[in-house]
Image: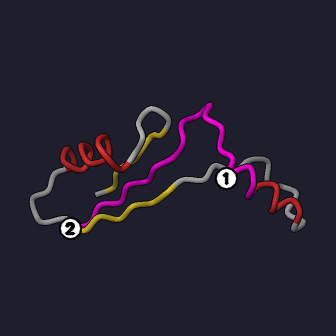
Amino acid sequence: MKARVTVMLKDGVLDPQGEAVRHALGALGFGGVEGVRQGKLIELDLAEGTTEDEVRAMCDQLLANTVIESYRIEM
C-alpha cells in the first residue's frame, strides 16, 4: 500500500524558495505568475494494515513541522 503526504508551509509563513521561483519565472518572461508556494511530496510504501492514523502520527512526529507546515495524506 502507498501513501502520499503533501507538506506545505501554512498561510502567512514566508516562503523564500517560492518567492525565488516566482522571481525567476518573471525573469524568464512568465509575467502572469503572481505567487508561488513550494512544498514537498513524500511517498511512503506501507505494509498492509498500516492505518491513516499511523501515517498522521508519522507526519506529526517527523515528516512535517506542524508549527509552520500543514500536510495532506492520500492513501
The reply to whether discs 2 and 1 touch (Cβ–Cβ < 8 Å) is no
**Residue 53 spot, x, y in % from top left:** 20, 44
Image point (73%, 58%), residue name: 21
Residue 41, compared with residue 34, is above or below; it is: below
State the image quarter where residue 56 is shown: top left
Give x and y (percent) for residue 6.
Answer: 44, 53
| Residue that badge 1 annotates | 17
Report the colour scheme. Answer: secondary structure
Please name whichever residue, 65 or 31, is drawn nearer the observer in this view of the structure.
65
Residue type indicated by callout 2: Met
- The mark lying in front, picked from 2 and 1, is 1
Which region of the structure is painted magenta? Answer: 1-21
Query: Where is 33 relative to 10, above or below?
Result: below
Check the image and name the residue furthest to the left. 49
Residue occupying image coordinates x 86% and y 59%: 26
Q: How many marks?
A: 2
Image location of residue 27, percent across then percent down: 89, 63
Is the residue 64 above or below the residue 42 in the image? above
- Kindly state the secondary structure of the residue where label 1 is placed: helix
Q: Residues within 10 Å of mark 1 (few under 14, many from 20)?
A: few
Q: Tell me the amino acid under the disc marked 1.
A: Gln
